[in-house]
Image (cartoon, helix red, strand yellow):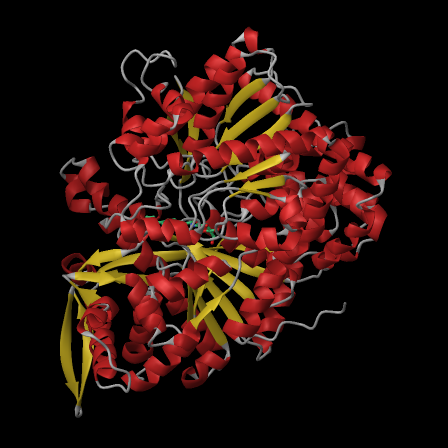
Amino acid sequence: MTTKEAFAQEYEKSLYAIAGKGFEESDIKEKYYALGNLIKSYSGELWHKTRKKQNASSEKSVYYFSMEFLTGKFMKKNLEYLGLFDLAEEFFESKGVCLGDLFDAEEEPGLGNGGLGRLAAAFLDSLSSLGMPGHGYGIRYEKGLFRQGIKNGYQEEIPDNWLVDRNIWEHKRYSEKLEVRFGGRIDYILKGDKYTFKHADYNVVYAIPYDTPVLGYKNQNVNNLRLWGAESPEDLDLKEFSKGNLCGAFNKIDETKSISQVLYPDDSYYEGKKLRLKQEYFLVSAGIQDVVRNAVKNGIDLKSMDEYIAIHINDTHPAMAIPELMRVLMDEHGLEWEDAWEITVKTCAFTNHTLLQEAMEKWDVNLFRELLPRVWQIVEEINNRFLNKIRNGEKAVSLTDIEKLSIISHNTIHMVNLAIVGSHSINGVAKLHSDLLKDRELNHFYRIFPEKFNNKTNGIIHRHWLLSANKGLADLIRDLIGTGFERNPIELKKLLEFTEDSQVLNKVESIKHNNKIRLAKYIFDTKGIKVNPYSIFDIHAKRIHEYKRQFLNILHVIYLYDLLKNNPNLDILPRTFIFAGKAAPGYYLAKEIIKLINRVADIVNNDLTIKDKLKVVFLENYNVSLASLMIPAANVSEQISTTTKEASGTSNMKYMMNGAITLATLDGANIEIRDEVGDDNIVIFGLNDYEVNAYYRDRNYDPVKIYTENKRIKNTVDKLLNGYLGDAFGEFQPLYDSLIKHGDQFFVLGDFDSYATAQKRINTLYKDSQNWSKMSLVNTAGSGVFSSDYTIERYAKEIWGVGAPERKD
Ligand code: 26Q
């Protein structure tokens, strides 16, 4: 693409343009901006060409609507995808600067909470890398997910001011701004013999697009991630200003801007907050208006819009895309209800990411109607027509079913019902999850619309988690099976030929060891804790939640520690338990779990009598960058959610790809991982879905009985209260109570023995290092099926009706 000399010259120019400085005078941030700017000049031309090609073609485009896109940093990825990484590295090395320092200068956009946001980013990457026209719509939050600090063992939330300097990757396109309308009233106007609706007295918010190029992997394709920022059309209030009320003069502007101020930090608990509703409608209205505007500009007849456009709704958060598309088609383009409805259902598809009842979105009718009067009317009409249809349909539907199916009931709008009724497809994100949706949670809908339900197991970007994050392993794989797996990760299966090759197995072990040394250094630099890279690195990193059961893990650590204290010569291999993850700021018990982990870490790490056989580390501020350092260093991947609670999980796939052994319940995609690698290469424990469901059904789970009858469990749990952990003020009483007084909703005690046995098995397996490396290699070999490229190919074919380019195998 470019030569070394040309690159050097262009970089010099870019530095002048960005900073007005030469190489020696400029600081690291300026060097970073200049390189970002240069990368943009390369990708910009490809972006332009892609757009031209897409606008001229009749190929169907996908628009992925999501309240979250957790992209991670851009610089390293863009260099890799343009094939410029080596050149850039060489150039900066020759100047005595480490390219990694430029990567460190980039602020990481934290525009997502966890799995759902990361999946959205993976899908954009795959769409672009497969050369498909697929674009993202989201919100440009001024403040991303809070940064996590730890003070006295407790989580501290620090605002994430990621835009405080500048974001070199985005392009503000003010001239393409759109109006989003809130509040006001609806007037009915008779035109001929037809009533039309006129929205009056509303408040306007400007939606300003900020575009970021999404590069495909070495394929010249560049798609778009369009994030909307809210601005006020009003200037400061001059009346207030001239009265000297400076604050009052800015009130309205501030209120408007607040829509894109901050990402809600909850990922599993829903609260009906007005600001969140405003955010969701803001995204949906701007996005839908933009899609339709583009379609019209490209000469698409809106009556056949579904042949050219697919809209994907990432969980219910953007489900108002359905009534909003109806509104735009009818009120702005004059379509009749029936036509608009047919187009809407054919265009929209929806993914569900959770079975947790407390995470289901519901809106209070009064709040909704006041804020979105026209959308409310449309939702009400959708519901009336739907209920009429099923009442008069062929299938008999009971009254209880009608109540469950209704979009509106008890003065509440049920967003999942709206999403299903208004889409042609609803999918879960792993086989078990999709089956539970059909058979249990949404069975009432499945009986009416069986054809809408399908499964699309999640996927991950192997380009990031293997090629980029674990260069050592990627190089070994290239030596063994060539480069085909880079574009076709299923070829990783070829590694199975080497499972008896001790030279290869030794290399697998030494690559893992080097990754562990790298993580150990980070742990020492950030926490001052010395960990032994020869110990088993056992990692549990994800959002902190009762259902993800970090509590079970740390209770087991307490048990192990006690065993060791009583018998320092106990035959166990040295183990380092590493945790990371953020708790929702309002989630009291999750924060207590963090405190407990840190307390146990303090005690264990400072106890000389156990001879370094146990270390516990809590790494702060888990994000994509930290995950990229941790995952390649893991020997054991903790995927221990209460069965049926984790819809899929995606970190489970990243760890196996990097050769960690999964310690898991048969939940979410863990089941599919087991199916890939076989029972010998994974360690499974715990209640299965039948047992969990039977407990829920029969209400006969009795944690108090387990506690009183099982000495080992009682001894361990009692340590939460009896001063063993040096807690003078009954600090851990709420955690104790969650098990003993409040019914242990997540079966921590029910699974404890089985977990302890599984951990013992890990210990035994690790003793045979050749066999462990073999298991590790089998896991990497089996990980190819979890590439998000394949997931996207299935969405394209089975949901969107988009022609994915044929694979050349
Ligand atoms: C909803 C309303 C108000 C405020 C916040 C929210 C909200 C925000 C984020 C609700 C849920 C989320 C995120 C959910 C999530 O990340 N779910 C995970 O999705 C992954 C991708 O499919 C799955 O692998 C995980 O199993 C699932 O937990």
Task: Say if 13 sits above or below 443 in the image.
Answer: above
Q: Position of residue 404 (x, y in %)?
A: 23, 66
Picture residue at 38% right of the left edge, 65% below the top:
439
Query: Residue 311 vs residue 760: left or right?
Result: left
**Residue furthest front as drawn:** 709
The quadrant holding residue 784 is bottom right
Q: Position of residue 411 (x, y in %)?
A: 14, 61
- Which residue is more in the foreground, 43 or 639? 639
Task: Say if 199 sits above or below 715 in the image.
Answer: below
- Which residue is more in the foreground, 225 or 585? 585
**Residue furthest bottom as drawn:** 193
| Quarter of the figure that contains the N terminus | bottom right
Q: Position of residue 69 (x, y in %)?
A: 48, 51
Task: Say if 198 sits above or below 411 in the image.
Answer: below
Query: Residue 677 vs residue 249: left or right?
Result: right
The quadrant holding residue 729 is top left
- Which residue is more in the foreground, 341 or 390? 390
The quadrant holding residue 290 is bottom left
**Residue furthest top as drawn:** 608
